[in-house]
Amino acid sequence: MDVSKMLCRLDATLKETMKQIDENAKGTVFVIGEDKKIVGIMTDGDIRRLLIDGHGIEERIEPYVNRNFVYARITDSQEEIRKKFNEAIKILPVLNEENEVINYAEYDQNLHISLVQPQLNGNEYVYLMDAFLSTWISSTGKYVTRFEENFAAYCGMKYGVATSNGTTALHLALTVLGIGKGDEVIVPDLTFAATINAVLYTGATPVIVDIEEDSWCISPQSIEAAITSKTKAIIPVHIYGQPCDMEKICSIAEKHNLYVVEDCAEAHGAEWKGKKVGSFGMISIFSFFGNKVITTGEGGICVTNDKNLETKMRIYRDHGMSKERRYYHEVVGFNYRMTNLQAAIGVAQLERIEQILAWRKELEIQYQNALKNIAGVSLQQDNLPGRKKIAWLVSILVDEKKRDLLMEELKRKGVDMRAFFIPLSEMDIYKEYARSCVISKKVAARGLNLPTSYEMRQNGVERIAEIIRDFLKK
Ligand SMILES: *Cc1c(COP(=O)(O)O)cnc(C)c1O
């Protein structure tokens, strides 16, 4: 990285400094005076402490710069530089005789790469502060409404009902569709447990079916084979950013008079034949947990085009309370609301979703280039007909017998990753609901999710690829 990204002028404001730190993703800037000579250092921790102490974001950093700092000289040997690092010091400026910063040195043994890290460097902080200072910190406030409207519009849908998380969104959707005891709901075997848990909360019986070999999404053929007179709904999950075959699924649903509730928790912005996921279901849900494509910390939303369902969802979400008569409860409702603070972050995240998706895509392409020639690695399909997937985590398949050992190796080298979800059919509490799931077992045993962390260093992808290449060669 260009050393200029590490520099910040002494007359900068806290806000400008924070921006610079975000841009270089190193947690630190070197502060220079007008004469280009170094004055001191500031870290993201310093700025956080100043803000907590009540300093304004437009204040200048000058009085607060840490002027007693560790540095290296260009004449220092690698060994001398290495000795300057410790628990607290992971990066330092390299100075010439004039005390100008001409490079930086970074501690990068066992450099840690985390699986995901949210990007919060747009208006997140500003809106969050605005919501906070307005004192509307609970679930009423302008940001909730704005987030609901903006997110629904983003999906091409009329209404959005924000919730406390993706799981409550799913439960809310199934509830207002009248799904309950005696009903069957079809779910894929390869998904996060929240998908099936929400079905179980309603008292309905989940029916677990297999996935497609190429997309890893729920198999339309298996859906059709699992339909009975009790089936009420299908929950297609756009797994790991890959959209399901919504044409086949919707036509099956239509033929058998079933509801489609899309679980889009991992696929914000993905498209089936030019139409965004979330716009096919009677109701569709998204999650904004901290590791998803965009985040509100914890959060979720239901989107729909049906005014009646929207009204019902608001009533159930808000304790089942009548809109006309306060404290009169029409139904046994829930408290599933999103707070204005969460929504403030969400509005800012949504402003930049295209940038975030583009950045993720770029990272995925880097991975594709670095991994494509490694024997024994197959990448998630990225060009299936009709589907425009988005990059959430980067997913690969390796030899089943080597998968867990490779995971250990990556972990030893400081790379966070995770195995694919354990198929629902392989867990004691769910297996009674499963139909034959051959493909999902095969895929899940081979699958690995690699990091798409914002902090990933320039050479992060290359480093990970090298570890995988060396390991698989053995
Ligand atoms: C994350 C996730 C959910 C649940 O979302 P939360 O906000 O964590 O409750 C549901 N389904 C899938 C497929 C997910 O990945």
Image (tube, rainbow, N blue to C red):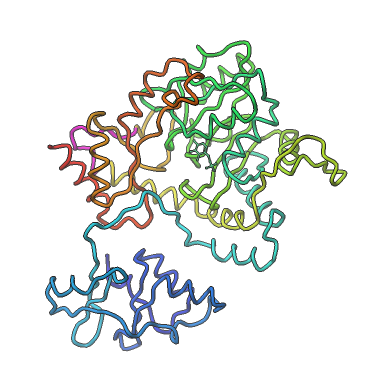
| Residue 284 x/y as whole percent | 59, 34
Q: Quadrant of residue 240?
A: top left
Q: Residue at x 21, y 78 (%)?
A: 72
Q: Is residue 378 magenta?
A: yes
User: Which is nearer the eye, 181 or 212?
Assistant: 181
Q: Residue furthest front?
A: 428
Residue 282, horizontal then vertical, whole percent: 64, 29
* Quadrant location of the N terminus in the rendered image: bottom left
Residue 264: image location, x then y, percent: 52, 36
Residue furthest right as drawn: 325
Q: Quadrant of the C terminus?
A: top left
Q: Position of residue 51 (x, y in %)?
A: 52, 74
Q: Nearer the viewer, residue 392 or 168?
A: 168
Residue 299, relative to residue 171: is it above or below?
A: below
| Location of residue 239 (image quadrant) | top left
Q: Is residue 328 above or below residue 118?
A: above
Count of residue discs: 0
What residue is shown at x 62% (from left), y 58% (from top)? 341
46 lies left or right of 247: left
Residue in front for this viewpoint, 327 or 469: 327
Which span is picked out in magenta? 369-380
**Res 448 → quadrant:** top left
Relative to 330, say whether 222 is above or below.
Answer: above
Residue at image coords 41%, 65%: 22
